[in-house]
Amino acid sequence: MGMFNGCSRRLAYGLATLAASSLVALPARAHVVEEAYRDVPGRHWAADAVAEMSIRRVLMKGFDDNTFRGEAAFSRADLAWALEDLVQELELLSKTAWTLEKSREQTFIDLRGSEAKTAGILKLANRYGLWVGVPGIEGDRFHPEAQVTRAEIAMVVRNLLAVGEARGVVLPRDPRSPDNPFKDVRESEWAFHAILEDNQRYRVMVGFPDITFRPDGLLDRFQFAAIGSASFGMIRELIRRSAVERAALTEKTRTDRFLERLAVQGGAAVGRASTPIDSLAMDLLLRAAVYPSELGPLGKWFGYVDASIGLSPVAGGFSLLAGTGPQGALLDDVLGGKLQLQPYAGLRVSRSVDMSLALPTLGGFAYWRREALGLQVQTDLAPLEVAGPAVGLLAAAGFQADWRLSDQFAIVGGVQWENRPGIGILRGLIGTQAKAW
């Protein structure tokens, strides 16, 4: 007897399931199984799993004589057929291709049957690497009729989720090194790490009530239906939860960005100006810095906008800076905190006693934050003698610390140094930062 295949049969099953589910409640699934397969009674222990895997999801095939043959061996070719549709579903769910960075180049001379079936197995093996590490699949042979074990399922699932994690669409439930909860899984087991990672890192496969996993257990079609309906459902839920958590992490990163929540800064600077006559450089400083992600079209072009004005007649001026580049933390664990780097370009207008000068500026800052404490180092590069005498490579440098008293306010202190044509300024700064909106 030939097995069902083709889109028309799958569509018919899907429409039948949809119609049945809209007309009846929980007992409908058993009724649909009985209608589809004359050898699967509605009260069979695997009836719900068969309905899920073979009718609702169409990840397993029935036979032309309306039988499921649940006690028949479940082969590696059957597994590939189920996984091909599962991978497609997960890619649609996550809106991401789960393929390897570099495709493998295996060929299997023992594959027979339709061209589509052979192409599917090769795609899963080479583009997704699902059978990496599985004994018996070596060189140019796949052994499609080999009966699948629970250990092989564990390895294939781990390989699949590892690709998803590398693509950023799977976030592990517990990234720590997993402990071994199974009394029959020893380190000598070839799938030892895969079994533990599936069970604890991803939490998509479970064992039996007697605290065993039974890795060498050969699967029949009923048993795979039971494993698939439970584990594949857990994988789908893992993808959905990962998407929610990724969105939350993105939002957290956004709110952790430099001055995102503390956007306006005011302070007083007192220092020394090395003009022809040394003088005290007192200054009132007002500064606003925002990430314009919430400001419409600006957010498409700039990752950072900073404007400041100094009121001192000796060392005042105005600056407008805009930056693109890293959005949020670049490194998440630097001395227990987060580190961000932000390059920028803009215009600085400097004013002293006897001159005013407008110069383009390139620069950047490194900002480190750990809980309430933030530290920033900032530098500007001098232009190449655009106007007036050259000032060297470094035009300005500064160090600043902020201490957040709440989500709304922080105190700020720091040291700034500027090298301008005809004047050098060193000053200390103390002030406050506040959330603008």
Image (cartoon, rainbow, N blue to C red):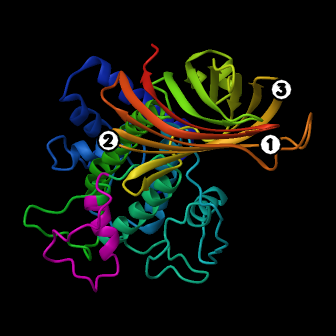
Amino acid type indicated by mark 1: Ala
Residue designated by label 1: 382
Element type where label 2 sits in the image? helix
**Residue 213 at x, y = what percent?**
20, 69
Helix, strand or loop for the magenta stretch, by majority = loop
Question: How far apart, in angstroms, are the residues tagged by discs 1 and 3?
Answer: 13 Å
Q: Looking at the picture, does residue 129 appear above or below residue 41?
A: below
Report the front residue among 407 and 100: 407
Query: Helix or strand or loop: what does disc 1 sit on?
Result: loop
Left or right placement of residue 93 versus residue 106 in this view: left
Q: How many marks?
A: 3
Name the mark nearer the viewer: 2 or 1.
Answer: 1
Residue drawn 26% across the image and 46% down it? 49
**Secondary structure of residue under mark 3:** strand
Q: Which residue is mark 2?
A: 52
Residue 102 at x, y = what percent?
A: 65, 65
At horizontal 59% and vertical 56% (from top left) the residue drawn is 99
Report x, y in % for residue 126. Answer: 61, 66
10 Å crowding of disc 2: few (<14), some (14-19), many (20+) = many
Q: Is residue 339 above or below residue 35?
A: below
Q: Which mark is residue 247?
A: none
Query: Does 194 lie within the magenta span?
Result: yes
What is the number of the mark on residue 357? 3
Residue 421 seen in the current view? yes
Tell me which numbered mark, 3 or 2, is placed earlier along the sequence: 2
Question: Identity of the amino acid at label 2?
Answer: Glu
Q: Describe residue 357's horizontal placement relative to residue 375 as left or right.
A: right
